[in-house]
Image (tube, helix red, strand yellow):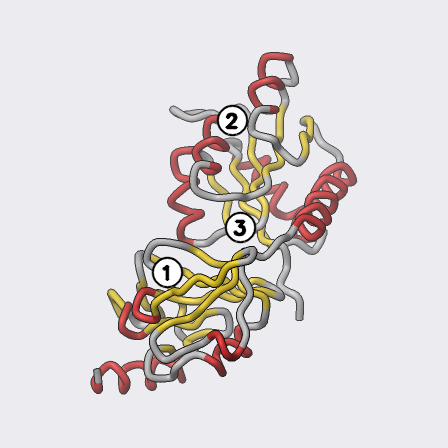
Amino acid sequence: MTKPIQILIVEDNMVIGTNLSMQLNELGFEVCGLLPRGEDVLSCIRNERPDILLLDIQLKGKLDGIETARLVQSEFDIPIIYLTSNADEAHFRRAKETKPRAFISKPYKNIDLKRAIELTVEAISNNARPEATIENHYVLTDRVFVRKQDKLMAVAIKDIRYLEADRNYCRIFAVEKEYLLVGTLKSLEEKLPRANFMRVHRSYIINVSQIDEVGNNHVSVGGKIIPVNKIAKFELLRRLQTL
């Protein structure tokens, strides 16, 4: 089953934000968060990265929507759709510098919201260019070779923190860098050394030696909270005792 598009809403009017969330759910999208302040956005994205950021330009607090977008773009490449009730030239010029995918004027129509998101999703799909690919013979016992353009780059097994499913791709989160790989999480699970890696959730494989904390139903790896299912939790504790 295809994972629904994850959308993070940043809107300081909670009535508008809640209605927007309900509309998006009805359209088949999944809202992964509703935040009222720009100051909270970056930490939220670090914990759970959305596919699209739906951002009100006029936020209360120290950061308006445009400044929030710039802050996010300093770390992440996430498509932005602006919501605005003020379409004056000054705001438009500032917002345009952040290269948003669309502007939606308030009060917005349901069809405008749907079309803006669908066009953004289509643009993401058309412009997707994986940073690296991986094949069987590129996985060794102590490192993984990933292809980037015309080069093979070595990523030490010990430096890989976790892998996350991303539709038809997988993301490797290493100590210093992130890599996008072609292939399913299951195919990569079969190639990685079992002594180091363990599937703890349908969307995550972790490097057991990189665990910082074990909770009741999660682990923390490099500051990322990763869910752990009950069956995996029992096996994980057993393996930790043997390290």
Can you identify the residue that label 2 sits on? 66
Q: Is residue 195 left or right of residue 99?
A: left
Q: Residues within 10 Å of mark 1 (few under 14, many from 20)?
A: some
| Residue 50 circle label | 3
Q: Secondary structure at mark 2?
A: helix
Estimate the spatial distance between the alpha carbons at disc 3 and disc 1, rounded to whole Å.
20 Å
Q: Is residue 18 left or right of residue 27?
A: left
Q: Are marks 3 and 1 in contact (CB under 8 Å)?
A: no
Q: Quadrant of the C terminus?
A: bottom left
> Residue at the spot x=55%, y=44% of the render?
78
Q: Amino acid at mark 3?
A: Pro
Viewer-proximal residue, 108 or 14?
108
Q: Decide which of tag 2 and tag 1 comes sooner along the chain.
A: 2
Residue 232 placement (x, y as % from top left): 39, 81
Estimate the spatial distance between the alpha carbons at disc 2 and disc 1, rounded to whole Å.
30 Å
Q: Amino acid at mark 2?
A: Ile
Estimate the spatial distance between the alpha carbons at disc 2 and disc 3, rounded to whole Å.
18 Å
Viewer-proximal residue, 52 or 85?
52
Q: Are marks 2 and 3 in contact (CB under 8 Å)?
A: no
Q: Is residue 160 left or right of residue 119?
A: left
Can you identify the residue that label 1 sits on? 174
Residue 182 placement (x, y as % from top left): 59, 66
Does residue 139 lie above or below 169 as drawn?
Answer: below
Q: Decide which of tag 3 and tag 1 comes sooner along the chain.
A: 3
Question: Which quadrant of the view contains residue 89?
Answer: top right
Does residue 11 lie above or below 161 as drawn?
Answer: above
Task: Report how many numbered discs are placed on residues in the image.
Answer: 3
